Image: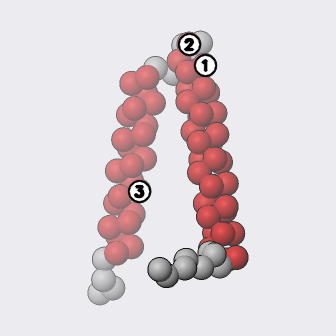
């Protein structure tokens, strides 16, 4: 039976770094959601305003990415 080698230190470090990034993304998403909830509750912004802004930003980002991917003329 073949014996499995222990993962290389670089691979272990990469896995730990990825776990840290995932944790940071989760915490940032949670903070953003809490902020949006507070602003909606106070009447500063509506959920529709947030959704429209998100769609606009996504459309702008996609347009920029398409522009960056377009070949030079």
Sequence-earlier tag: 3 or 2: 2
Image position of 10 with respect to 30: above or below: below
- Label tally: 3
Point out residue 20 in the picture as x, y percentages from the top left corner.
67, 54
- Mark 1 closeness class: few <14, some 14–19, many ≥20 residues within 10 Å: few
Is 56 or 2 nearer to us in this picture?
Answer: 2
Compared to residue 20, the image places residue 35 above or below, namely: above
Q: How is the image coloured?
A: secondary structure
- Residue 38 placement: quadrant: top right
Marks 3/2 in contact by CB < 8 Å: the verdict is: no
* Quarter occupied by residue 12: bottom right
Classify residue 24 as left or right of residue 63: right
**Residue identifier under label 3:** 61
Q: Is residue 61 above or below residue 23?
A: below
Position of residue 35 measured from the top left corner of the image (x, y, whole percent): 61, 27
Q: Identify the element where label 3 is drawn.
A: helix
State which quadrant residue 17 falls in.
bottom right
Circles 1 and 2, Cβ within 8 Å, touching? The answer is: yes
Within 10 angstroms of label 3, few (less than 14), some, or many (20 or more) residues? Answer: few
Task: Report the residue at 47% width, 80% height from top.
Answer: 1
Q: Residue at x 63, y 47 (%)?
A: 23
- Location of mark 2 (residue): 41
Q: Nearer the viewer, mark 1 or mark 3?
A: 1
According to the picture, the residue beneath numbered tag 1 turns out to be: 38
Q: Quadrant of the C terminus?
A: bottom left
Across and down, in percent, residue 32 comes to 59, 34
Kind of element beneath mark 2: helix
Mark drawn on residue 23: none
Label 2: how many residues lie within 10 Å, few (<14), some (14-19) or many (20+)? Answer: few
């Amino acid at each position: 039976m073949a014996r499995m080698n222990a993962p290389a230190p670089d691979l272990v470090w990469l896995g730990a770094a990825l776990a840290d990034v995932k944790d940071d993304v989760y915490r940032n998403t949670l903070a953003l959601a809490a902020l949006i909830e507070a602003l909606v509750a106070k009447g500063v912004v509506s959920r529709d305003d947030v959704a429209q802004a998100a769609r606009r930003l996504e459309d702008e980002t996609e347009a920029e990415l398409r522009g960056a991917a377009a070949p030079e003329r």
